[in-house]
Image (tube, rainbow, N blue to C red):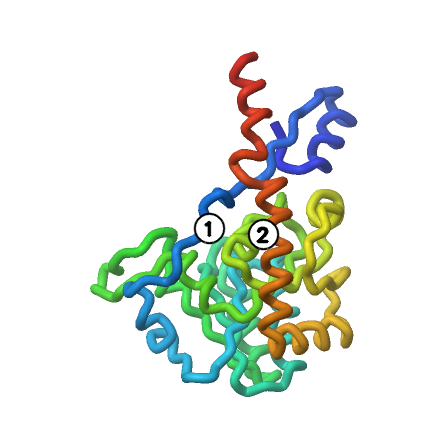
Amino acid sequence: LVINSLAARELQRRKGVLADLLPNIFDYAHPPEPPDDYVGDLRSTLGLEPGDRVILQPTRVIPRKNIELSIDLVARLADPHIKLVITHHAGDEGLDYLHQLRGLARKRGVDLRYVADRFAPMRGTAPDGTKVYALWDAYPLADLVSYPSMIEGFGNAFLEAIYFRRPLLVNRYEVYVADLAPKGFQCVEVANGMLTDSAVADVRTLLSHPARVALQAEHNYRIAKHYYSFEAVTPLLERLMAQ
């Protein structure tokens, strides 16, 4: 089994082994519940004011995630109410990259909120008694999800954003081009990790047209439900179990 078609092709080329494709999947048959009382204080916890807009970077803080592009996006939108929120931890590959991002954000006048200490895979309480939110609790806050990765094995955060019906900016990384883009998802796209004026204009349009965002979100949800739901892979799993 492989997670993307490029891996299947490489496995056959290098080893002569034929593989089945089992991509990332989500339970699209059951949409997420509306935000509950637990997250009622989340905006204030993150220091967000009424009227603030959130661009969410829901990835680990490592260089291949290309978070510089998200900082560039917020800087070029030139709206002091737009905050860049990073929910996942740094440290997998050292902390130098986080320090570089913070310095770049200060230089570009971007309000970067690195709030990984307030999020975890599941809700709970930190050792110091601080309330901790689930990573998924961040998605309903987002006015846009930024996914500028240069390399991904598939794109779990991509499917999560669609599950929560959030608009997306995505870099056309190799697996996205091969497996996701041909399905017809509607996203703001950039290539080679470079932010264009047209992409900035498209994001600005989405942030000011909620009706357009809603239509796009439903379109993307239908596609993901067709290709990347539990039901979509059931025939493959049934065949494998029978074998």
Relative image position of residue 230 (x, y in whole percent): 52, 36
Q: Which residue is labeled 2 in the image?
A: 221
Q: Residue at x 57, y 64 (%)?
A: 145
Specify the amino acid type for callout 1. Pro
Q: Which residue is labeled 1 in the image?
A: 31
Of residues 189 and 129, which is closer to you in this image?
Answer: 189
- Would residue 149 be found to the left or right of residue 172 on screen? left
Of residues 55 and 239, which is closer to you in this image?
Answer: 239
Q: Residues within 10 Å of mark 2 (few under 14, many from 20)?
A: many
Q: Given contact means CB atoms under 8 Å apart, are the residues at marks 2 and 1 in contact?
A: yes
- Would residue 236 be found to the left or right of residue 119 on screen? right
The image quadrant where one finds the C terminus is top right
At mark 2, the secondary structure is: helix
- Earlier-in-chain disc, 2 versus 1: 1
Q: Disc 2 versus disc 1: distance between alpha carbons?
A: 9 Å
The image quadrant where one finds the N terminus is top right
Residue 45 versus residue 107 in the image, above or below: above
- Would residue 199 be found to the left or right of residue 40 on screen? right
